[in-house]
Amino acid sequence: MNDDEDMRKAVKDTYGRLATESRSCCDSPKQAEMIKVYSEEDLSDIPVEVLSSNCSCGNPVALARLTSGQVVVDLGSGAGMDVFLASKKVGPNGRAFGIDATPEMVWKARASAKRMGLENVEFRLGEIEHMPLPDATADVIISNCVINLAPDKSLVFREAFRVLKPNGRLAISDRVLVKELPERSRNDPELWGGCVAGAMLEESYLALLREAGFAHVAVEERRLYSDEEAMEFAQSMAEEKRTRGAVPDVEVLYQAYRCIANERIVAIKPR
């Protein structure tokens, strides 16, 4: 892939397929990872069709510390799980927005919200680099393993800063690099869609947040994959590639997963 549009297409193709096939972005290992970061109580209220399409590397709703009456925006809301969880936290006097660039995911999330009878949620189709929301809309912005998919992360953070109210909170679960990826991994469309090839080094990621105007930028948790976990993800990705007619190199995939960490990152928009 040579430009931003190729990257966007790879991501939209991946997540459109996941929405229609009701699969997670990395299937069994990703689903196992999701279960680790959400409580049984959280997951018990989420429809199976939403759980089956969820892609996550953390629990930004817990990180966000939401309270009743707040407005929360989820960047890259997918099938809507974090929006649905946030809607319970902010209550009937609050509001939860989901922004996603994949039409199939937005349609799926809207249908689920209707079946669940949720009146304080809204899903909007749009790129997180160009959010369809006015200035100073949100008390809190969350995102779950999505910003690494954006070609222009600096623009995402500037948009988040714009949409947050003064003293608003940004709470992100995302994948970052702890060392540079092998070059072959950078140009792999499945690894882009799998939240790996688009990741950037942690120090660069945090620097972009500060450049966008955020203060009190902090990593609250960092989790690296063990050798066994990296190999499990590599083998799952290899199987996905085989279904597309590719001949995967499991060792290259394994080395890519050894470069990343799941992090919980918070920041504040100053008053």
Image: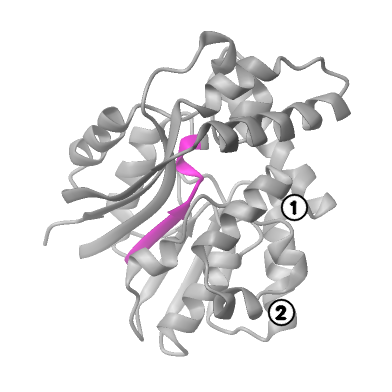
Q: Amino acid at mark 2?
A: Lys
**Is the stretch drawn in magenta largely helix, strand or loop?**
strand
Image point 54% across, 17% down: which residue? 186
Q: Quadrant of residue 62?
A: bottom left
Quarter of the image with the N terminus is top right
Callout 1: helix, strand or loop?
helix
Q: Position of residue 91 (x, y in %)?
A: 45, 87
Residue labelled with disc 2: 114
Part of the protein shown in magenta: 138-148
Q: Is residue 72 magenta?
A: no
Q: Is residue 138 visible?
A: no
Residue 115 appears at what percent x and percent y? 75, 81
In this orientation, which residue lies closer to the viewer: 84 or 255? 255
Q: Quadrant of the C terminus?
A: bottom left
Q: Is residue 63 left or right of residue 101?
A: left
Q: Residue 262, how many percent across, how many down? A: 43, 43
Residue carrying label 1 = 104
Give residue 50's quadrant in the image. Answer: bottom right
Q: Which residue is at 61% across, 73% downward?
A: 43
Residue 109 rendering spot, x and y as whole percentages: 68, 65
Q: Residue furthest bottom?
A: 92
Q: Secondary structure at mark 2?
A: helix
Up-down relation of residue 40 to residue 141 (above or below) = below
Q: Is residue 268 left or right of residue 101?
A: left
- Residue drawn at (19%, 56%) of the image: 269
Q: Is residue 194 left or right of residue 156?
A: right
